[in-house]
């Protein structure tokens, strides 16, 4: 690198360092301009409100004079961790980092996310699943009974419930999108019959099968509330009887079935080859020959 360019870069670094020590004023007008620009990018309304709330909190936390200085973001992080979970703190700091990048003051950014140790996922046992179903039926709670069965028998995603329409149930397949990948979830004959019976008894001719009194699809945040009384009656911790736990139970059961079928399929292929060659070979060696 030429010495002149090195000298310019050194001067720029010193200027940034001096500016960081003196502090840079932050104004509400800058925040408003940033939010206006963000809104023009057609971001979701909820995200815009989140950014507005986090930046307002950031502005209010600035010291007297409303100047940001080197080290403020680190102290801000430590202060937030005393009140909120790491995931929430990460969102707050990421929002401020985006704003600082927008106004050209990257030197104040705090880089890096706080890693949060996730608690081990609690599993629902195979014995508890039928007990949960029996309890829902005993309480005459058909909706929860069918939801439990849906998640455990199909691996259905709770966020895809709006796609579980009466029309889709009649066809026996539901089109879902996981990570923007189109997937088709098959609904078995027995479950299809129960879901259509439920829809008919509740006067649901079309649209979402599980809906609120207003006719809208049940939100995923409402599912744990629906399942809680059944869990309490079954004496099963509701943290182990979530849609996610039921999905894991489905995939665990499917993996067990596939592991048992795999050797049978292998022997089936070997026997088919045996019939075609009139001999049985294992690892390339002829074991016996049919005459």
Image (cartoon, rainbow, N blue to C red):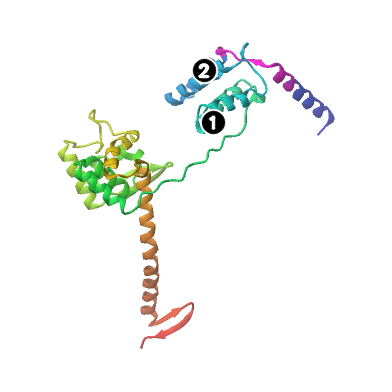
Specify whether 221 is left or right of 28.
left
Q: Say which mark, if any, is on residue 90.
A: 1
Q: Is residue 265 visible?
A: yes
Neighbor class of circle 1 (other Cα within 10 Å; few <14, some 14-19, many 20+) is: some
In the figure, 101 relative to 172: above or below? above
Q: What residue do we see at 66% from left, 19% from top? A: 69
Element assignment for label 2: helix
Q: Toward the viewer: 214 or 76? A: 76
Q: Toward the viewer: 243 or 271? A: 243
Occupied quadrant, residue 211: top left
Question: Is-magenta flag for residue 21?
Answer: yes
Q: Can residue 153 be seen in this view?
A: no
Where's residue 266, x and y in %? 40, 70
Residue lying furthest right: 3
Q: Say which mark, if any, is on residue 180.
A: none
Label 1 to label 2, Cα distance in Å? 16 Å
Would you name the residue on which mark 2 appears?
A: 56
Numbered range of the magenta stretch: 16-29
In the figure, 138 relative to 58: above or below? below
Q: Which quarter of the rendering shows the C terminus?
A: bottom left
State how many labels appear: 2
Q: What residue do we see at 30% from left, 50% from top? A: 129
């Amino acid at each position: 690198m030429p010495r002149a360019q090195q000298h310019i870069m050194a001067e720029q670094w010193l200027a940034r360092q001096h500016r960081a020590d003196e502090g840079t004023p932050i104004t509400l007008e800058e925040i408003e301009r940033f939010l206006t620009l963000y809104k023009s990018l057609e971001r979701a309304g909820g995200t815009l409100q989140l950014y507005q709330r986090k930046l307002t909190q950031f502005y209010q936390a600035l010291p007297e004079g409303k100047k940001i200085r080197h080290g403020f973001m680190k102290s801000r992080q430590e202060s937030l961790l005393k009140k909120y979970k790491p995931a929430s703190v990460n969102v707050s700091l990421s929002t401020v980092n985006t704003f600082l990048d927008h106004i050209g003051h990257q030197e104040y950014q705090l880089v890096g996310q706080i890693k949060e140790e996730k608690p081990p996922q609690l599993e629902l046992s195979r014995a508890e699943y039928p007990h949960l179903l029996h309890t829902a039926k005993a309480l005459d709670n058909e909706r929860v009974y069918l939801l439990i069965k849906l998640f455990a028998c199909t691996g259905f995603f709770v966020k895809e419930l709006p796609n579980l329409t009466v029309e889709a149930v009649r066809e026996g397949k539901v089109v879902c999108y996981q990570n923007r990948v189109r997937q088709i979830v098959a609904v078995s004959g027995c479950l299809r019959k129960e879901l259509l019976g439920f829809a008919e008894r509740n006067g649901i001719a079309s649209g979402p099968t599980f809906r609120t009194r207003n006719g809208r699809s049940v939100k995923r945040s409402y599912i744990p509330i629906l399942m809680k009384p059944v869990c309490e009656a079954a004496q099963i911790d509701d943290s182990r009887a979530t849609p996610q736990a039921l999905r894991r139970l489905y995939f665990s059961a499917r993996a067990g079935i596939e592991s048992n079928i795999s050797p049978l399929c292998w022997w089936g292929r070997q026997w088919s080859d045996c019939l075609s060659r009139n001999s049985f070979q294992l690892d390339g060696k002829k074991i016996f020959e049919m005459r």
